[in-house]
Image (cartoon, grey):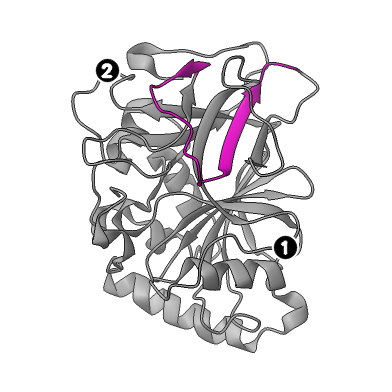
Amino acid sequence: MMAHDTSFHRSLSLPLGARFILGIMFVIFCEASAATAQALTEDQLGQGLSISLWGPHTQCPGVAPLVAIEIDPDRYRFSVHYYQEDGFSDPLDIRQWQERTGHDLVFNAGLFRENYAYLGLLYGNGRSLGSKRHPTWLGLFVAEPGADRSRRARVLDLTFDSFDEAQPPYREVAQSLMLLDRTGKIRVRQTGKRAHQTLVAEKSDGHLLVLKTTEAVSLYAIGECLREAFPSLRQVMAMDGGSSSDVAVSSSLRHATSKMAVLHTWLPLLDSSSITHIGLPAVIGISPRREQDSTKTGPKGVR
């Protein structure tokens, strides 16, 4: 959402079916013990990609369950997309982005101005997409390093970590808010404003976790919750929120998942057909990694 727009803090309505599922999950998670609050019951969508509904209610009574998407960067590559760079005259909504790029999964990047200019550093396929470093938003999603020895995707904190804009060490970059740093400090103010949120977290095992709220929540509250209930998270950044907070899963993965003989509690919560979507100028997509392709490209700027 545009940085100055008050709808950044507005909740999105969920369909009736999704609210029913969410109510059931609240009952289940309320009965869970604090010792199991971090456990995730995962749907394995592919080698290195899983989705679950994580309910931290025991330790975080003010935070509704979150859709948790765990990604192994050694098996999935990341691509940053900006609508003009990809040849589009207007921003696409999350469903259109997924369909046009063909990624298995797409989620929103950071904040943007009224003219859709991205607020902060943004790199795609090694090219700067015209944004300058934001002086106070110090979270930096980075992926696809030039050096093989580097982790393939990370969350950097510009308070502690350096980033050379002249010679960027990563090909895919998106700057946004730092939420929870490696020292356990929450890096946002306690304003009381509530909205849907999209978060990107780096785990201690090197996997990335994309978290999507199912109800409006304050960033400070979710930062406290993650610090107490999910200690394996090394650090967490917040992407854009409100009506810009969005995730899309490919129809092929959704179809394959629906055939599994288990209850997929996250499916109705990411039901693209029943949720209002807005145009997003910048998104991040993931696709299975093909080792023979050093830089995978395709038509219309798709990578």
Task: Name the side, left or right, on which 205 lies relative to 59.
Answer: right
Q: Quadrant of residue 17?
A: bottom left
Picture layout, residue 154 above or below residue 166: below
Q: Residue at x 29, y 56 (%)?
A: 243
Magenta stretch encompasses residue 155? no
Q: Which residues are magenta?
A: 125-147
Picture layout, residue 10 above or below residue 210: below
Secondary structure category for the residue under label 2: loop
Secondary structure category for the residue under label 1: loop
Going by the picture, which residue comes out furthest to the front?
135
What secondary structure do most residues of the magenta stretch adopt?
Answer: loop
Q: Position of residue 273 (x, y in %)?
A: 25, 53
Query: Which label sits in the foreground, 2 or 1?
Result: 1
Along the line of sight, the residue nearer the viewer: 45 or 114 = 114
Q: Upstream in the sequence, badge 2 or badge 1?
A: 2
Q: Quadrant of residue 270?
A: bottom left
Q: Circle 1: is it few (<14), some (14-19), or many (20+) Cα within 10 Å? A: some
Can I make out residue 1 in this image? yes
Tell me the CA gap for discs 2 and 1.
41 Å
Task: Name the side, left or right, on which 122 lies relative to 148.
Answer: left
